[in-house]
Image (spheres, rainbow, N blue to C red):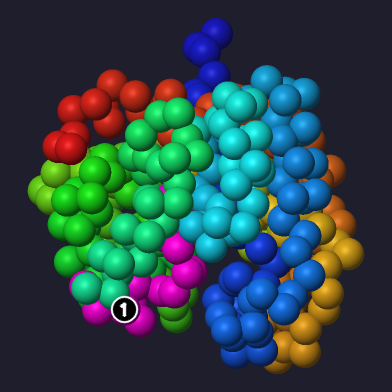
Amino acid sequence: MEPAVMNVFSIDLEEWFCVYNLSQVIPYEQWDRCESRVERSTLAILELLSQHRVEATFFVLGWVAERHPDLVREVERRGHEIATHGYSHRLITHLSPDEFRADLGRSLEILTPLAQRPIRGFRAPSFSITRKTWWALDILRESGIRYDSSMFPIGFHPDYGVPDAPLAAHLLSEGIWELPMSVAEVAGKRVPCCGGGYFRQFPYVVTKRLMQACNNQGRPVNFYLHPWEVDPGQPRMPLPLVKRVRHYNNLAKTMPRLERLLNDFQFTSARVCYGQDLASSVS
């Protein structure tokens, strides 16, 4: 019997009101007025990971780390990798190179003193590294980032996607590794199976089969989730129907599904899963 493929478990550590889906009803300027719920949700996830002895990668939003430094320290104390999610959760497609450099730099200034190890990983808000924002990769490398985990190799989503991107982890010509979000190929189509809204919308059995298809090809699945996705008690905002379904559907089912997922698959952090490859990138 072949050993199970080791997959990557990651958390985009942000508040419930930081998501792009809510940006029209809760702009950045109003964030400090909102109820903070990130600690209780993150601690619940940490307990679950501890029970299953899973090390994960936490892509931490700088804005949250600035307000909850002890939470970031607790994440690392429990053995998880600290990576960056930028500072303000502004999409790179909405930033100039100078604005992105400043946003990333502010995040690293906040996170670096909170972590015992260097910050080597980055995930863009809403996966906003696309062909239009390819310039951001050079800024990441210059800032000491060794791997990016932002590209979604799909073409149907209106806000993100690199349709022709490779499905497996690969070294970019810019000198950093790309750990793309996972999709399975079904009848010639690319179907996401990497967590987040897809994990909540699809029946669990569909996610499981898609992930198994990736593992059967020898590809680790790059799974992600947000703390607010295990918080069915979060405030409900007035949203258009599609956004409302995308954001709130099946929140109460996320934790039970995570239990099943952690029983069915093997997971670790990006730094462990790809350690030798990441060491070959240009710092």
Residue at (50, 12) in percent of width and height: 2
Q: Which of the image's four quarters has the N terminus?
A: top right
Q: Is 65 positioned to the left or the right of 238 in the image?
A: left
Would you name the residue on which mark 1 appears?
95
x, y percentage for residue 148? 33, 49
Q: Is 186 positioned to the left or the right of 77 in the image?
A: left
Does the magenta-highlighted stretch encompass residue 206?
no
x, y percentage for residue 179? 36, 44
Helix, strand or loop under label 1: loop
Does the magenta-highlighted stretch encompass residue 85?
yes
Q: Which of the image's four quarters has the C terminus?
A: top left
User: Image height check: is 271 above or below 95?
Assistant: above
| Residue 270 in view (yes/no) | yes
Q: Which residue extends farthest left?
A: 173
Residue at (31, 78) in percent of width and height: 95
Q: Amino acid at mark 1?
A: Leu
Q: Nearer the viewer, residue 258 or 218?
A: 258
Residue 67: image quadrant is bottom right
Q: Which residues lie in the magenta part?
A: 82-97
Residue 37: image quadrant is bottom right
